[in-house]
Image (spheres, grey):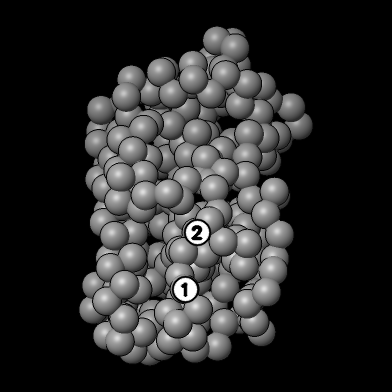
Amino acid sequence: MLSIISPRFENGLLARLPDFDLDLLGPLQRIDLAPHNALEVANREVDSIYFIERGFASVVADDADGGIIEVGLIGPEGMTGLAVVHGAEHSPFSTFVQGAGSAIRIDPDNLREAMRASPSLHNLFMRYAQAFAIQVASTASANGLLLLEQRVARWLLMVGDRLGESFQITHEFLSVMLAVRRAGVTRALQDLEARGLIRTMRGVVSIVNRNGLAQFTNGAYGVAEREYEALMGDYHPQPVEEIRHASHKVG
């Protein structure tokens, strides 16, 4: 879970930056994030970069039948706009808010200029881009190798890393994100609850045995998280309710 090393921001990347690098990013605008807001649209130019402070977003790919499947999660540990970090203009994936919250928004051109001007900022964002690429690869592996119950367990742990141990979720939403039938999600959640790993009540899922839930994924949860730890060092995911806004100026 996430520990912020600076009280100025609830986003782990911004929290790591010294004032010099923050100033290079230009105006910082704090905005609210509502569920289903599109932060990026596939194959369209990235027009804003979002550093999530509360909530989380899903990065999704279109499937051949016109549906979508989630390929990655972004929460207070990360940022959108990794196509820009890599020197591109757009991504083949879309990014939507799934858990309401807030974010710091900046202009993509400011990010490009800041990365050119500061090796330390460039290095930090490239390391996060690598961590996210590993998460996407880990998700692809899980989708191909795991039982549905194990995929659901891994997803719950990842959301728990970003929202805390209890959060609202619908069976319909989870079925869309995992590209499976709703009935299968319902059975998977019932199975996890019967094993004493989670508790469900009125649309709220509570993780009651995190270690057991992680073990149930047969090693699929933890690969991306360990790589994030190795790449990013002393910033770890933790519930963001414990963190408060402080001094750096934002709009």
Binning the other alpha carbons within 10 Å of mark 1 as few (below 14), some (14 to 19) or many (20 upward) gives: few
**In the image, is residue 152 above or below residue 134?**
above
Q: Nearer the viewer, mark 2 or mark 1?
A: 1
Tag 2–tag 1 contact (CB < 8 Å): no
- Relative to 6, 121 lies left or right: left
The answer to whether any part of residue 8 appears in the image is: yes
Classify mark 1: helix, strand or loop. Answer: loop
Three-letter residue code for mark 2: Gly
Q: Residue at x 43, y 31 (%)?
A: 154
- How many badges with numbers are in the image? 2
**In the image, is residue 13 above or below residue 117?**
above
Q: Position of residue 136 (x, y in %)?
A: 30, 49
Q: Which residue is mark 2?
A: 12
Q: Residue at x 25, y 28 (%)?
A: 145
Q: Which mark is residue 18?
A: 1
The answer to whether any part of residue 47 appears in the image is: no
Three-letter residue code for mark 1: Pro
- Relative to 199, 231 lies left or right: left
Q: Position of residue 24 (x, y in %)?
A: 43, 86
> Disc 2 to disc 1, how far (Cα)?
12 Å
When asked about the image quadrant of residue 150, the answer is top left
Q: Position of residue 26 (x, y in %)?
A: 49, 88
Marks 2 and 1, the one that precedes in the sequence: 2
Q: Residue at x 30, y 51 (%)?
A: 231
Q: Residue at x 37, y 40 (%)?
A: 225
